[in-house]
Amino acid sequence: MTDFRGDGPVPVRDGDTQRRVRRSPLLYTAPIVLLAVLTAVLGWEIVRANMSEAARTQWPWRLQLLDMEPLGSLLAVAAGAVLARAQYARTVRPYLGWRADWTTGQLRGGAPEWRVGLLNGGSHTAVIEDYACRVVLRGGPPGAGGPWTDVQGAAAALTAAGLIVGEDFQLVQMGNFPLVPAGGGYETATVGAFSRRFVDEVEALYLRVRVADAVGDSHERIMDALKGARSAAYRRPAA
C-alpha cells in the first residue's frame, strides 16, 4: 500500500503539496485591522501624554481618542483574539492526503486497477470548495498537458485519446463534499480508478483539491494520482 501525504506552504506547481490559499476576511483580517488601529491610537496617546500642557491645548494635540485605561483593555482583548484565532486555526487545519493501491472492483471485468482515495488527516471536517483535474498524455512535449478542468472535461480529454470510461478509468465528481477526519484507520473517499492501459498511456493525472476549514480558511493540494503506479515495487494483481 502506498501512502503519499505532505504539508507546508510552497509555490503552486504540479506536485504533491498543500498550502493555504485564502484566509477568512472576517475571522482573520478584521481582528488584525482592529489590533493595528488600537496600536496606532495607543501611539498617539503616548505622544500626547509626553507633550506639555500648553501644547495639548493646540490642534491636533488636543484631540484625545481614548483614555489609556480602556485603551489598554481593548488592546489586550484584540491581541488575545488574534492569538486565539491563530491557535484555533492551527488546531482545525485539514491535512489533505491520498492513498493508492493496485486492486480490483471498480472497473468492468475485474481487471487490475490503480485505485486512488482522498483523505483528511486533520482533526476537524473540511468541505471541498473546488475540485479540478489536469490530464498529461504520454508522448507529448516535456511539461505539456491540458488545462485545468472539471471531471467531465478530463473525461472528455481521456475519451478523445481512446480511453474508455468504466473500462480504462473511472473518475468521481466532488463538490461541497465534506471530508471527515480520517482517524487512525485513514479512511479514504475514492476519487478514481485506472487500468494498466491508462497508466501506460497517461503520463500524469493531476488533481487539485481546495477545501475550507472550520474557521473559513481555504487550503489547496495538488497531487498526481498516478504517482507510484509504475513502480516495480508494487505487487500488481494477476490479470
Image (cartoon, grey):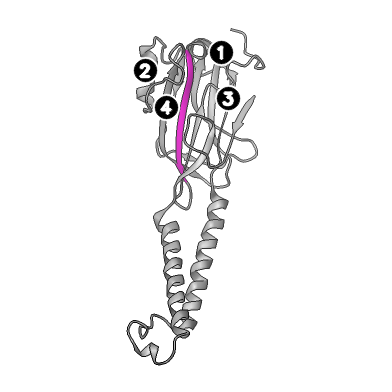
Say whether residue 70 is left or right of residue 150.
right
Q: Is residue 155 above or below residue 70?
A: above
Which three-letter amino acid code belongs to the residue tagged 1?
A: Pro
Q: Mark 1 = which residue? A: 112
Q: CA distance from mark 3 to mark 2?
A: 23 Å
Say whether residue 90 is left or right of residue 148.
right
Q: Quick one: label 3 or label 4, which is nearer the N terminus?
A: 3
Q: Secondary structure at mark 4?
A: strand
Secondary structure character of the magenta stretch overall: strand
Mark 3 or 4: in front is 4
Which three-letter amino acid code belongs to the residue tagged 4?
A: Cys
Task: Give the x, y percent position of residue 27.
Answer: 44, 58
Task: Give the x, y percent position of residue 208.
Answer: 45, 32
Task: Give the x, y percent position of residue 182.
Answer: 58, 39
Q: Which mark is residue 157?
A: 2
Q: Which mark is residue 93?
A: none
Task: Give the x, y percent position of residue 187.
Answer: 58, 34
Question: Residue most toward the top?
Answer: 239
Which three-letter amino acid code belongs to the residue tagged 3?
A: Ala
**Is residue 80 or residue 119 the one in the foreground?**
80
The stretch of residues the image draws in magenta is 202-212
Q: CA distance from mark 1 to mark 3?
A: 13 Å
Q: Mark 3 = which residue? A: 100
> Would you say the residues marked 1 and 3 are in contact, meaning their CB atoms lie under 8 Å apart?
no
Q: CA distance from mark 4 to mark 1?
A: 23 Å
Q: CA distance from mark 3 to mark 4?
A: 17 Å
> Does the magenta-highlighted stretch encompass residue 211?
yes
Q: Which mark is residue 133?
A: 4
Q: Quick one: label 3 or label 2, which is nearer the N terminus?
A: 3
Mark 1 or 2: in front is 2
